[in-house]
Every structure is written in structure tokens, then in C-alpha cells.
Image (tube, grey):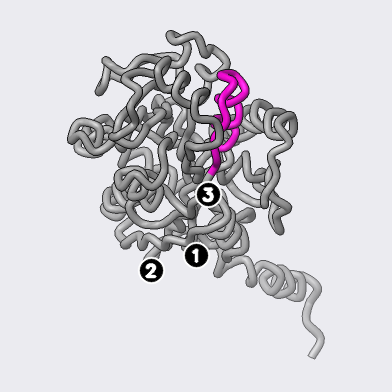
Amino acid sequence: MKLPRRTFLKFAGASIAAPALPRVATAQDYPTRPITMIVPYPPGGSTDVIGRLLAERMRRSLGQPIIIENVSGANGSIGTGRAARARPDGYAICLGLSSTHVQNGAFYSLSYDVVNDFEPIVPLVTTPLVLFARKTMPAKDLNELIAWLKANPHKASAGIVTVGIQVIATLFQQETGTHFALVPYRGTAPAVQDLVAGQIDLFVETPVQLPLVRAGSIKAYAVIGDTRLAKAPDIPTMGELGLSALSFFSGWYALFAPRGTPRDIIGKINAAAVEALADPAVQSRIVDLGLDIFPRERQTPEALGALVKSTAEKWWPLIKEFGIRAE
């Protein structure tokens, strides 16, 4: 039977549009099952703590649990690579940081593009960094520490978890004329365990480890930033101590999705994260950790995309200048 032209076009248009209907329905109903948040470091470290804090609060907004999957190794690039290869349907997101989503791109030969293979969701928090040391380190302050390192070249060791920390350690040695070994770790937790045990001498980390300083388990010598910590105002900054080249370093944490994740799904995850960051209980915990929440007007995918770009412009030349390579 020959169909009238108008009827034929109506059916033809419907058949062409049909494949798009499931995607639209999925985006409208999202989420209908648990979401996986890939954390590219082991349990117990700063990244894991932030991920679990955020996931618990976001669950209330999204109506589905967010399951943390810790995938560590290679400065976070293994877990980040898994996120890059995940199905772009909103059921796999990644908690990234300046190291995994910028610095690793200049350090490793990766099977994915740290900038272009992800959809930015939301910037979460910024963090200054602190130079910690084993509790038995004889130096009382940073100047004494530098003098001790000069008097004991190649005898000390520093734990390295991210490319950013490796750059900082390299620049610190260059600026102070000191020399010490760099010991790679899969994550913060095992590095801190070795620092407490005295197996390594130094470690650069976020203020999350300040309770160990208060307990007398480790020491803190300086903030690697330009502002003293509100939670520990007695710790001087590198800039105050004459190391201005190290005073501008800070890190950030953010949420990303695989490239191609629909924008309306990105919007729903962003809204849940923004709501979580506005929760007084979450804010109180973040402040206790010594971290700073991004201003509300910057909690957008566009702001995160711009942040990734500006961070790459700052860090990639430094990594190239120091000749830092994966071993």
C-alpha cells in the first residue's frame, strides 16, 4: 500500500527521532541507580576524605547512593584513566585534583587527554600545602631544617604522591641548595604512616594532617602558600621565610565526568554538589580540614574549565623546565 506523502514523512520523522527518546528519558529520570565516584588514590588520604564527605551529602539530593571506588597508582593516573574510559551516562564521575587533571598531562605519556577527555562539573575546594617532617627531626624551624639538610646531603628523604609535590620538592632543593631523595607513594595514607614511623623525613601535604601535629606525631615547618592557616596561625609561610618562589603553590579538588556526558546530567550533579557545599555541616568539616570552598559564583562547569586551563599554563612549563619525567 502506498502511503500519502504527508503520512510517510510523519512516520519517517518519528523513526529518525526514536533513537533519541531513550537518551532524553534517561537524562530526565537520572539517576535511577547508584553512581560511582572514582577516587584515584587509596582510602584514608585527603582525596578520599573529601570524596566521602561530598558523596554522603550528595546522596540526599540525587536520591541514589554514591559509591566510592578507590583506584590508585601512577600519581592518580590509573584511576583517572578509568574515569576517562567510562560510559558517559553520569553513573561514573571522578574526583580529580590539580595533579590528576593537569600536571599528569605534562608528566606521563597517557592514553587519554587530561584536559579534553573530561567534562568539568564543579570546582570544590582549594588547599594550601604544608611542609611536614618526622617528629624526631632535630631542627626547630625551617631555617634550622635547611641547615640540617645542607649538613646531611642525600641522607634525608621526602615522600612524593603527586607530580605537583615532586615539582615543589625539586624547587625547594633548588632554592635552598639542599639534596634529598624523593620516595614515590601510591597515596597520602601510606606516606603519612611512614612519616609518623620515621621511615621518611619530609612530606608535603594538605592541612588535613594538622591533627597529627597537635598530637605530637609529626612536625610542621611552613605553609607552602602566601597566607597563614586560620587553623594553625603559628605556622609561618614560605614567603615570610624568604622562599617567595614557593609561596604561590596551592592545590584544588573538583568533580569531572567522562567526555560526552549530557549537559543536563552534568547540571544535576553540579546542583547536588553545590547544595552539598552549602550545607553547614559539610562546610564545618571542610574548615576543620583546613580547606577553602570555592565561592558560590565559581561553582560552575565553566569556571572549572577555565581553572584547568590556567593551572596548565602555570604548571606545564615548570614540569618541562625541571625535566621531571615518570620513572
Query: Residue 260: x and y, percent?
Result: 63, 55
Q: Secondary structure at mark 2?
A: loop
Tell me which secondary structure the magenta stretch mostly adopts: helix
Task: Judge from the rendering whether residue 247 lies leftward or rightward of residue 287; answer left or right.
Answer: right
Residue 199 or 110: which is nearer the viewer? 199
Reading the image, the residue beneath label 1 is 25
Task: From the image, state whether disc 2 or disc 1 is nearer to you.
Answer: 2
Q: CA distance from mark 2 to mark 1?
A: 14 Å
Amino acid type, residue under disc 2 in the picture? Arg
Residue 80's image quarter? bottom right
Q: Is residue 274 magenta?
A: no
- Which segment is the magenta one? 166-182
Q: Which residue corresponds to mark 2?
A: 33
Q: Does residue 279 appear in this view?
A: no
The residue at the point 51 percent across, 43 percent down is: 160
Q: Is residue 320 above or below residue 72?
A: above
Label of residue 184 in the image:
3
Q: Quadrant of the N terminus?
A: bottom right
- Closer to the chain start, of discs 3 and 2, is 2
Residue at the farthest front position:
151
Q: Position of residue 130 (x, y in %)?
A: 39, 28
